[in-house]
Amino acid sequence: MARARIKEKLAHWFSQPVLVGAALVLGAIVGTLTAFFGSILQNVSAIRDANPLYWIPALAIGGVAIVLTYRKFGNGSERGMGIIFDVAHGKEREIPLRLIPLIMVTTWVTHLFGGSSGREGVAMQIGATLGHNISSKIPVENAPRILLVSGMAAGFAGLFQTPMAAIALSIEILLAGHLEIAALLPATVAAVTAYKVSEMLGIARFTVDLNSFSPDWNLAGLFYGETGLDIYFVLKLAILGVLFGLVGGGFARLLPFSKKFFAKKFPDPVKRVAIMGIVLSALLLLFWQGRYSGLGTNLTDLCFGNAAALSAGDAGIYAYDWILKLLFTVVTLSVGFQGGEVTPLFTIGATFGAVVAAIVGVPFPLAAALGYAAVFGGATNTLFAPILVGAEMFGFDTLPAFFIVCTVAYACNGGKSIYAQKKIRLR
């Protein structure tokens, strides 16, 4: 009995350095791959933006090529994040390595021809696939799940350069209301390693100093007046949280509904992507020749690119930018094109926040920044990740505002997620 307990203790203490060592290697590989993927994606997007009339009309051709490629070589990997979550939840056992080149290439094709999609899904799939496959060589209990989580953290950190948010996202995303604490240390090592490697390879983080927008306000001054805490400002933040939670939750509801609708309307995947590719091309060109194509960073840059802007109109943001970006992204991802949801969600949140800033009575750049993170949290049904996304991208002095808004958004999203989360059943 005593010998068994000693053996169990030794195995436990042995497992941590083994997992940390594996996470270090995993982070370095994922950081390199995400830097490569991200740099090619930037170049592809620049090519499309320079000649939108050459590329966007051929979106249907690119879509057909994507569907036929997965039909011939996919072997189930076309399910993307779906297979990652199924493996994490024990419904599947293997993640094919072919998923990595397929998701990278098909996402480049989607963006080259103007599809409205993101990139985080690619990075997280790269990390999770490598982590799960590496785990087969490691004789440690629960290694597949821990390294899958660590790989997702590495992918997000390597691409977005936000390691703390990446760690939080990876440990809270699989099971609603539960944190994968067993994976915390390996996920931290993998995320920080991927972050540093991709940084050295030229991936830059998107950051904004909100204090540079106006000398007339600062966050401390907005929270506290001469009589103490400004409860009216806190209520304004709570109202923003409700609105952002509804938008994020609405996106999470609309996406699966849209996928089912188009699958029923066009049962043949090739016809579906061809017909809807033509429709999307026409609409994307009609609405200002690709304003809503790609990641949406062009709109995010407008939100924060003019320090003198006092409103969405001053910054060049239209009142309907957020809803059109939302609809184009949902349809693009529903009919067979590849990519992620998070970067468009950042854009949807920032542009929506910019539009409602004046209505709620919150400074325009602050509302845009809060929407940037909170709509992402509302759509992913996560709490800590969006708070840390906001702090890492907009400065840690903004943390109290992000905490209030993201908490309310999390409470108001209806418990929906763009990912296949499991939910804890309370008895």
Image (cartoon, rainbow, N blue to C red):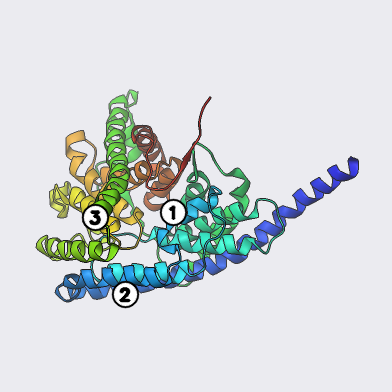
Crowd band around label 2 with a 10 angstrom C-alpha radius: few (<14), some (14–19), many (20+):
few
Residue occupied by mark 3: 331
Quarter holding residue 233: top left
**What is the C-alpha distance between the residues marked 2 and 3?**
24 Å
Name the residue located 36 percent from the left edge and 50 percent from the top edge: 394
For marks 3 and 1, give the CA distance: 18 Å
Q: Amino acid at mark 1?
A: Gly
Taking the spot 41% from the left edge, 49% from the top edge, the residue there is: 389
Left or right: residue 50 compared with residue 127: left
Q: Amino acid at mark 3?
A: Val
Which marked residue is nearer to the observer: mark 2 or mark 1?
A: 1
Q: Position of residue 196 (x, y in %)?
A: 52, 64
For label 3, the crowd category at 10 Å Cα-Cα, with few meaning under 14, some 14 to 19 and many 20 or more, is many
| Residue 212 can be seen in this image | no
Mark 1 = which residue? Answer: 82
Confirm or deny contact between disc 2 and disc 1 (CB under 8 A). Answer: no
Q: Disc 1 on helix, strand or loop?
A: helix
